[in-house]
């Protein structure tokens, strides 16, 4: 049973991710996806970064790019973030599964001015 508490779900996803096996990574990706789509969730770049890393570990590079691009302006000076985004873009392009994302990303968060707003 999945806990309703976002903090517990995040810890569960991280524990699954750290095991590093494909079944656990898939379970972690499902948890992260549900956490990011939950309207009760506040924007948390760390959670989204872990979700993107999990997607990349699963070979879902286009998904990782979508997640990362939603908060790219939030981490302008973080080299590891840009390295991850660049790597995922390259790998997604190599698979023919990457296209530039539009400004509006649909569900999730969007940077508006100096704040982040949920877009549903």
Image: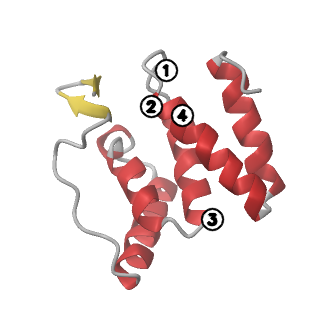
Q: Which mark is residue 41?
A: 1
Q: Is residue 106 found left or right of 76 in the rendered image?
A: left
**Distance in Å between CA atoms under marks 2 and 1:** 8 Å
- Residue 52 versus residue 2: which sits nearer the camera? 2
Q: Secondary structure at mark 2?
A: helix
Residue named by callout 2: 37
Quarter of the image that includes the N terminus: top right
Mark 4 burial class by Cα count in 10 Å: few <14, some 14-19, many 20+: some
**Most distant residue in the right direction:** 19
Instruction: Please report contact status of discs 2 and 1: CB closer than 8 Å, yes or no.
Output: yes
Query: Of marks 3 and 1, which one's residue comes earlier in the chain?
Result: 1
Location of residue 77 with respect to 90 vertically, above or below = above
- Residue 46 is at least partly visible in this image: no
Q: Secondary structure at mark 1?
A: loop
**Distance in Å between CA atoms under marks 4 and 2:** 5 Å
**Distance in Å between CA atoms under marks 3 and 4:** 18 Å
Location of residue 29 with respect to 90 vertically, above or below = above
Residue named by callout 3: 57
Residue named by callout 4: 34
- Residue 66 versus residue 82: which sits nearer the camera? 66
- Residue 79 in the image: x percent, y percent? 46, 57
Q: Is residue 85 found left or right of 107 in the rendered image?
A: right
Instruction: Please report contact status of discs 4 and 2: CB closer than 8 Å, yes or no.
Output: yes
- Residue 15 in the image: x percent, y percent? 80, 41
| Residue at position x 72%, y 27% in the image | 2
- Residue 74 versus residue 66: which sits nearer the camera? 66
């Amino acid at each position: 049973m999945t806990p309703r508490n976002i903090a517990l779900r995040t810890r569960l996803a991280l524990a699954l991710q750290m095991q590093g096996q494909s079944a656990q990574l898939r379970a972690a990706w499902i948890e992260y996806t549900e956490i990011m789509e939950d309207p009760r969730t506040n924007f948390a770049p760390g959670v989204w970064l872990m979700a993107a890393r999990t997607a990349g570990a699963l070979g879902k590079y286009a998904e990782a790019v979508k997640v990362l691009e939603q908060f790219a302006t939030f981490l302008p000076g973080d080299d590891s973030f840009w390295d991850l985004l660049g790597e995922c873009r390259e790998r997604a392009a190599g698979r023919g599964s990457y296209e530039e994302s539009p400004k509006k990303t649909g569900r999730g968060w969007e940077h508006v001015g100096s704040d982040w707003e949920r877009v549903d």
